Each structure stands twice: as C-alpha cells, then as structure tokens.
Image (tube, rainbow, N blue to C red):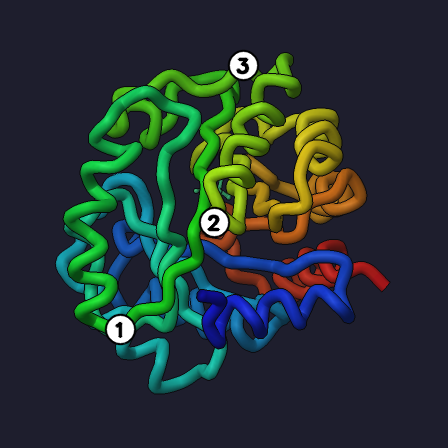
Amino acid sequence: MIGKIESSLVEGLKTRMALFFVLLDPDSGSTEHVVECGLKAAKHGADALLLGGSFVGNANFTKISAELKKETSLPIILFPGGCSHVVPGPDAILFTTLLSGRNPQYLIDEQVKGAVLVKGFGIEALPTAYLLVESGKTTAVEFISNTRPLPSDKPGIAAAHAMAAELLGLRWVYLEAGSGAQNPVPTQMVQVVRASTPLKLIVGGGIRTPKEARERVLAGADAIVIGNLFEKEKDPALFIEFANAVHGG
Ligand code: 1GP
C-alpha cells in the first residue's frame, strides 16, 4: 500500500523534474553536527532527508531523528544498512533489497528480521531495489555487503535488474555508486534503466557538482542523493545550487 510519504514524494514530481534527497550519515560527526547539516538542507531546498548508511557505528541514530523532527516537517527516511538500523521515529524507510548482489543476507534475511520492527514501529515502507554499480574503487557497501557491484559499462544488466524489481512489485530503484564513489553512476546507465521501467529511479553516490546532478536528472532520474559533499561543505549556496539543478525550471 502506498503511504502518505511516498504519495507526497510522487506528488512533488508533478512540479519538479526530480527530487533532491540529502543523505545524513550518523557516523559523519557529532549528533549536533549531523542535525545541523540536516536542518541546513531542509531550509535550502532538500525534499527529504535520508538517514543511515551501510555501516553505522553511532548509537545516536534515534536521537538524530528525534532532533530533526522537532525542527523540520521534511520527511525523514531511514536508509538502513541492515535490520539493526531500524529505529522508531523516522517517517519512512527505504525498505531495500540488495538486488544487484547474490548474498541472501541482504536479499532477504535482513528484510525478514527488519519487517517485524518496521511494522511494529509503524514506519512507512518504500519498497526499493538497491542496485550497486561499480564506481572505480571498493565502497563501504560493497565491502560490508560482500557483494559484487554491477559493471558500470553494461547498462543492459542494470536494466534487467530494474525490470525484475518491477515484476516483483517493488516501486523504487536506487542506482547506487556508493558513498564517496570515485565515479558516479554513468548517465548512459541512468538512461537505459529509465527506458526499461516506469519505477521511480533514485541515483546517488559520488555526485559532486550540480552539473553532474542535472545530467542524471535529464537522463531520467526521479531523485538525486547527495551525502558526503554536504558533510564537509555546508555552504547554503551549494544546497540551493543543487536543489535548482535537480528541481529544474
Ligand atoms: C550514498 O548515494 C549516497 O549511499 C550518497 O553518496 O555520499 O557520495 O554523495 P555520496
């Protein structure tokens, strides 16, 4: 069932070319630092805040979400690396399956354990196929998940995975180069995946300039995720530039 948050994101796409998601990594600094970064993003054009990462060692996960919720009405969407990251508080969760991999733990095992928590906490789930794409160096998600990424020069393979996601009833595809990736997901791959399925398409990992973001929107992305960049650089002007590049106009 499509919930309130997903409906509002889809609604947002009626007036914007794509949505601008800012990823907050709980491990990127103190709780105050992460919250400050999230609030800056909320104030300067983000459409949603993703919270999480493949490896989270910060026990303040719940606190970050609670602090953000006090100050912003922007959707806070969990982006978990596993079932242990499911905490009460966020509005929604990217309920992902690492479909590009062949490790049963991240294809279904974490989901079975996490489902009980997601339903118990009443968190809205956005069913998402997570496709990890080769990006020039080993990323945290590749290492932690013990899976091989999809070849970046074989967009047809990524498209076949996206089609499988559609036929399995998922609603979102996340084309992921990995946080801090050397190379973002190639524009051509975004185009080919876009042409293969009507599912909502999220693209992230290693996008460092508004131009790179815009190119992927023009290729068919419905949402762009920026993380790393804003952990170091919190200049509001940069948030605004990214938001404009992603939203279009
Ligand atoms: C990682 O796609 C996100 O899961 C964001 O990547 O941190 O490289 O922007 P960056």
Q: Which residue is mark 3?
A: 151
Q: Is residue 120 visible?
A: yes
**Cα distance between the residues tagged 2 and 1:** 26 Å
Percent from the top left, x then y, of residue 195?
75, 34
Residue type highlighted by circle 3: Pro
Q: Residues within 10 Å of mark 3 (few under 14, many from 20)?
A: some
Q: Split into 4 quadrants, where in the image is the C terminus?
A: bottom right
Establish if 15 lies above or below 172: below
Res 122 label: 1
**Cα distance between the residues tagged 1 and 3:** 37 Å
Dot 2: element: loop
Percent from the top left, x then y, of residue 240?
68, 65
Q: Nearer the viewer, residue 222 or 21?
A: 222
Sequence-wise, the earlier of marks 1 and 3 is: 1
Establish if 6 lies above or below 164: below
Q: Nearer the viewer, residue 92 or 248?
A: 92
Sequence-wise, the earlier of marks 3 and 2 is: 3
Q: Nearer the viewer, residue 135 or 75?
A: 75
- Which residue is pictured at 34% across the width and 86% down the height? 70
Q: Which residue is mark 2?
A: 227
- Which residue is pictured at 49% across the width and 67% down the height? 2
Left or right side of 92 for 226: right
User: Can you tell me whether the CB of the residue at mark 1 lies under 8 Å from the nearest atom of ligand 1?
Assistant: no
Residue type highlighted by circle 1: Gly
**Cα distance between the residues tagged 3 and 2:** 23 Å
